[in-house]
């Protein structure tokens, strides 16, 4: 039996010798690579923190001590060492382990994560609860250099420096978030790593320690060094963090198990707020991931993307933006640390002076775009639906209130699949519908997305949000050119028994269901509103009145969604209206197809529900 298979709790790790822990490190990496090859998942980020995770589990007493992982896409080694190794093969699968920390999954998961930059604030909350309760425990936040670019991290740092309680922040610096990091914070961290004092440490200390044959002796040597003279070398004065009142220690090598274990043993005893700067290699131990950390950040099964039969929405957005950038010199593109995921890489290469990656700072991205718009440019902000939630105030206060003609390309609308509840785009429609003046479009296929995007960048007043799902388009029926104008929809199929209004791709699901229902003698009209705001209200009222019954279908939260808006449009007609969407609960992790089926939104379920509603 492998060492890993014998780990049923964190206490089992601390009982191992340092030599055995080094064997365990290799077993963890092999397990992650083998499993993720079958299931897909976040590979490079997890491979980079194996030694750090083993050291944390060895030094701290879990679950009494609290370890909070920022974002959590690097938590696979953590799951393996906290009693979940026997279920690790189920990760990100329906009914299996989540791909992120979850409080309801394991007592060692102190705080659920998925979005970045929350760890410092959450850890400070744990630390203050400990102090007020008079408990004796340690609190650690592990945050990446990418997550440190977000404003929330500095809000937490500011408060921590003011309070001054005992708490450790581990800054995991691999020079990456999903894509290479940008900005002044990244430059500051680079300056610390390239400081001659750090190179002196590597040359005169770590290499010397490497000659000590016993790993246990290396740990004792490192601990003594940090406690005595080396501590003065490790503590670099005049860092940004010292200015916040947080003691800075580092940088230290995070992929050297003995070194990081020894440093953690000493640092865990230092009172007050401390930031330990740890340098790791993203993708460590798997050469393809080391060479292409961005490409191997998140991988599909067998490390290859399935070849799309049709174009994906993100690809269509990318192609259109690149073409718009060529023909219109005022077009600028903004992303919040997601140039790959949002499809802006090609635009960035061809028009670098008009591309802005602002780091993990969605709030700044939207307000920055408003300034660009008022300065005479045509900004497009490409952002995932789940991350747009973080900039909701800016959409209302800075964009809509001031009528800023910005375009929000809202990718990953609806359920996204295996990343689960932290990443589903469930709330964009209910969130955006009440905002005065905001245009909201939902293209059902790539042709319509391209047409709407080309039209939206020319609008002179009010912001526009174009919402589209992850993955390839499910069908390509013809598009009426007039539907690119706000307030225009398209009747895709005539019928007399019931009107089905499908939002975005759900119009195609409804169309397929209607074709099959015709064989059962049920005549279904299918209408794509295209624009959810302003909606084609007159068309909806006219067709609804003729059919006598209405069903709305959307791949987002039903509560407060477009179906509720249709009810208000039809309130005086006294028609039966059935609103279909995801019900009032967070959706779990599974494939997009499995989630749609479970919610009764696949076309087979629509056939049954339409039939029952009419019959």
Image (spheres, rainbow, N blue to C red):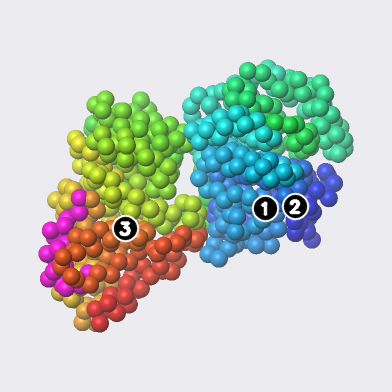
Residue at mark 2 to residue at mark 3: CA–CA distance? 44 Å
Viewer can see residue 490: no
Identify the residue at image location x=84%, y=38%: 215
Identify the residue at image location x=65%, y=30%: 164
Residue at mark 1 to residue at mark 3: CA–CA distance? 36 Å
Q: Name the spot of residue 238 as percent of width and height, x first.
A: 63, 18
Determine whether label 2 and label 1 are within 8 Å by CB. yes
Residue at mark 2 to residue at mark 1: CA–CA distance? 9 Å
Within 10 angstroms of label 2, few (less than 14), some, or many (20 or more) residues? Answer: many
Q: Is residue 349 left or right of residue 449?
A: right
Q: Is residue 104 magenta?
A: no
Q: Main secondary structure of the magenta part?
A: helix
Q: Name the spot of residue 284 as percent of width and height, x first.
A: 65, 41
Front-most of residues 296 and 140: 140
Q: Secondary structure at mark 1?
A: loop
Where the N terminus falls, by quadrant? bottom right
> Which region shows up in magenta?
534-550
Residue tagged 3: 561
Q: Is residue 33 left or right of residue 361?
A: right
240 relative to 590, above or below = above
Front-most of residues 416 and 544: 544
Residue tagged 1: 108
Residue tagged 2: 10
Q: Going from the N terminus, do you reach mark 2 or mark 3 first? A: 2
């Amino acid at each position: 039996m492998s060492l890993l298979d014998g780990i049923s709790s964190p206490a089992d790790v601390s009982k191992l010798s340092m030599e055995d822990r080094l064997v365990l490190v290799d077993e963890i990496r092999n397990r992650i690579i083998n499993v993720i090859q079958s299931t897909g998942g976040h590979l490079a980020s997890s491979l980079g923190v194996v030694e750090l995770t083993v050291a944390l589990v060895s030094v701290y007493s879990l679950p009494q001590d609290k370890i909070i992982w920022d974002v959590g896409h690097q938590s696979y080694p953590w799951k393996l060492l906290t009693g979940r190794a026997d279920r690790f093969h189920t990760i990100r699968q329906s009914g299996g382990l989540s791909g992120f920390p979850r409080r309801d999954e394991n007592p060692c998961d102190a705080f659920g994560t998925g979005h970045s930059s929350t760890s410092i604030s959450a850890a400070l909350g744990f630390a203050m609860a400990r102090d007020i309760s008079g408990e004796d425990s340690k609190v650690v936040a592990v945050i990446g250099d990418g997550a440190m670019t977000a404003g929330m991290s500095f809000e937490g740092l500011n408060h921590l420096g003011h309070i001054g309680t005992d708490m450790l922040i581990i800054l995991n610096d691999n020079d990456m978030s999903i894509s290479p990091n940008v900005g002044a914070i990244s430059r500051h961290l680079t300056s610390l790593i390239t400081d001659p004092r750090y190179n002196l440490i590597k040359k005169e200390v770590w290499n010397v320690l490497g000659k000590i044959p016993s790993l246990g002796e290396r740990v004792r040597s490192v601990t003594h060094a940090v406690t005595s003279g080396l501590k003065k070398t490790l503590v670099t004065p005049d860092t940004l963090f010292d200015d916040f009142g947080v003691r800075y220690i580092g940088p230290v090598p995070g992929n050297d198990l003995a070194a990081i274990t020894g440093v953690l043993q000493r640092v865990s005893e230092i009172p007050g707020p401390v930031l330990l700067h740890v340098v790791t290699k993203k993708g460590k131990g798997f050469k393809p991931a080391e060479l292409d950390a961005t490409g191997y950040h998140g991988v599909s099964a067998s490390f290859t993307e399935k070849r799309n039969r049709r174009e994906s929405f993100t690809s269509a957005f990318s192609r259109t933006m690149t073409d718009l950038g060529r023909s219109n010199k005022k077009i600028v593109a903004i992303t919040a640390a997601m140039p790959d995921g949002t499809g802006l890489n090609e635009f960035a290469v061809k028009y670098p002076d008009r591309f802005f990656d602002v780091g993990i700072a969605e709030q700044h991205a939207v307000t920055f775009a408003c300034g660009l718009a008022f300065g005479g440019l045509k900004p497009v902000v490409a952002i995932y639906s789940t991350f747009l939630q973080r900039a909701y105030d800016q959409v209302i206060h800075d964009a809509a209130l001031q009528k800023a003609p910005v375009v929000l390309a809202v990718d990953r609308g609806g359920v996204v699949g295996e990343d689960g509840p932290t990443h589903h785009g469930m709330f964009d429609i209910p969130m955006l519908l009440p905002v005065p003046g905001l245009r909201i479009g939902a293209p059902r296929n790539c042709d319509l997305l391209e047409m709407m995007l080309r039209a939206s960048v020319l609008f002179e007043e009010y912001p526009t949000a174009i919402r589209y799902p992850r993955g390839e388009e499910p069908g390509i029926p013809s598009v009426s050119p007039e539907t690119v104008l706000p307030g225009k929809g398209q009747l895709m199929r005539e019928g007399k028994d019931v009107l089905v209004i499908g939002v975005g791709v759900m119009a195609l699901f409804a169309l397929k269901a209607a074709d099959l229902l015709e064989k059962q003698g049920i005549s279904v009209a299918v209408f794509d509103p295209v624009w959810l705001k302003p909606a084609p209200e007159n068309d909806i009222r006219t067709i609804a009145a003729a059919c006598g019954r209405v069903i709305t279908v959307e791949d987002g939260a039903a509560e407060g969604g477009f179906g509720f808006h249709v009810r208000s449009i039809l309130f005086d007609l006294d028609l039966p209206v059935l609103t279909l969407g995801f019900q009032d609960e967070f959706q779990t992790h599974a494939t997009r197809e499995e989630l749609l089926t479970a919610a009764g939104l696949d076309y087979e379920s629509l056939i049954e529900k339409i039939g029952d509603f009419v019959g």
